Image: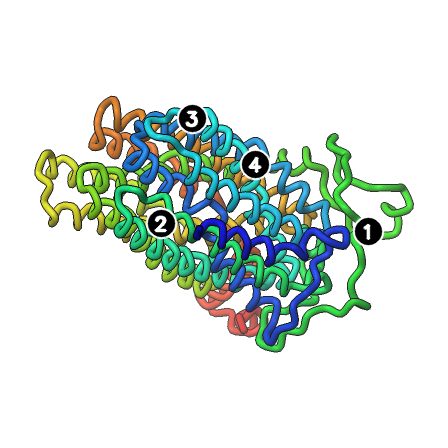
Amino acid sequence: RLVKVGFEGLRKMTGTIFKNGGNVPPIKLNGSAKTTLSRVAMFLGEVRDGLTMINMQNAFLITSKNYSEKEAGVMFFVFGMSQFFFQTPAGYLMDYSDKKVTLLGLAAVLTTMLTIATAILAKDDGENFGLMVFFKLLQGAVTALIPPGLNSITQGIVGSEGMTDQVSKNEIMNHFGTAIIVLSGSLLAFGLYPNIGMLFIVSPIACIGMIYFLCQIRPEDIDHNVARGLVSSSSAKSDSNYKPPTLDSQQNINNKPSFIFGFGAKSTDSPDEYLNGSPKADTPLKVLRDPLLLTFILICFCFHLSNATVLPLVMQTLALDNGRSGILMSGSCIIVSQIIMVLSAKICGDYSGVYGRKKLFIIGLLTLPIRCFILTALVAMRGDDESNFLNVLILSTQLLDGVGAGIFGTMYVLVTSDISGGTGRFSLTLGLTTSAMSIGGTISGYLGQALAQDVGYREAFLILGFISLISVSVYLLCMPETLPSFEETEAKREIVMTSIAEGDEENVVENKIV
């Protein structure tokens, strides 16, 4: 009955999205589009992955439906592979389309329906395992639209100069909303145990909230050329005097990404457009030849290869032998990490524009091997002893997850924006980096579950810890600082310090940093 009520509310809230050729009638409200973006992000965290997909759903299937770890790993693998194959086309579609709000709303509705279908139709002992795998195949394809959708809309509203502040706010609200929703789901699961399928009622509730605020973003709020990274400045400023662009100041996308996939400096629609001096988007193959982007793709892959399965394994460690209280503790894993991610995202927003991207990113990457090695020791100490104290210590490692994943979730969007500046391919580039995360997480999901089942949880955490050192090493040794203003400031500071050392006061005055 609750699921039916949720679907009815969802239908009423989303009905306007699919009328009038996909145009979304705006709902009048007080406040700016930037504030609305943060509210969208608050509800989008749960919707994006279907109750964080391979976290609560894995716990549900393993504890309530008697799925094996390998079966859960196969579902993770299919979901991730689907995301991998569709992520880059989804980014290209977002670059090409001026219906970004409609596409994002459609993706949210469909993934919510698939989450509910999983909860309702899953049978004991994996009797309809094939159907569940098919659902995850579809869900991976649908959710591929969400990261480039939200971030391209964000860049189109605030411009590249406002991305640091707005992405940080989006991530803060995302993690805050996810923590509240998962807490609600965990309490429902605790009360309903062992039949915990009804906890997924939070999915349509989150989707309704997301659609409500998404409908408040007006088409004229988004500069689509800025959203694509074709130009850096937007009519929407990142200060408190923000005023959305007017209809008269906005143009349709006259320089849409073409379907020219070959080599070449710039993609053009006609010789006249090339000669008139208007900016043109890089071809996809030119984007793919950027060594800096390829290095960052490798880092994203290696981080998620080791990170994606750690949280599900921690949740299973706590849930498998602890019944009802184990379900509550496994939900607490997500809640603890999400709360710390709020603080991490705030720090990234405040300091990544001051101290640069690299230092913060390395701190985030380093937390993962530390966390894995601590978990290895705690699981070894735990053995067959179901001590509540050790369970609390295992749960406390989620503090490190909050730091690492919180920094990564904010910084990878900012670094991608830095790399793609001027190419006109922001969403495509974000699709590539997110694809690397998806394929890394996909392999990680099956690898972690297989290791846990075949050699044990302790050895699984140890192996994942060593894998995580790869991303730290590559970023430290191969990635430069990507924040342009930071590099310029550092260069000026070097000139000043050299002049002081040489006693050249006039040169100091000429090159002083204001």
Residue type indicated by callout 3: Asn
Q: Are marks 4 and 3 in contact (CB under 8 Å)?
A: no
Quickly name the residue at label 4. Answer: 141
What residue sits right under mark 3 in the picture? Answer: 128
Between disc 4 and disc 3, whose residue precedes?
3
- Real-space Cα separation, disc 4 to disc 2, in angstroms: 26 Å
157 up-or-down from 4: above or below: below
Is disc 3 surrounded by few (<14), some (14 to 19) or many (20+) residues within 10 Å?
few
Q: Nearer the viewer, residue 246 or 490?
A: 246
Is residue 250 in view from this perspective? yes
Give me the C-alpha separation between circle 2 and circle 1.
Answer: 40 Å
**Closer to the N terminus: mark 2 or mark 3?**
3
Q: Contact (CB < 8 A) between labels 2 and 3? A: no
Snapshot colouring? rainbow
How crowded pointer 1 is (Cα within 10 Å; few <14, some 14-19, many 20+) is rated as few
Q: Which residue is mark 1?
A: 254
In the drawing, what numbered circle is on residue 91? none
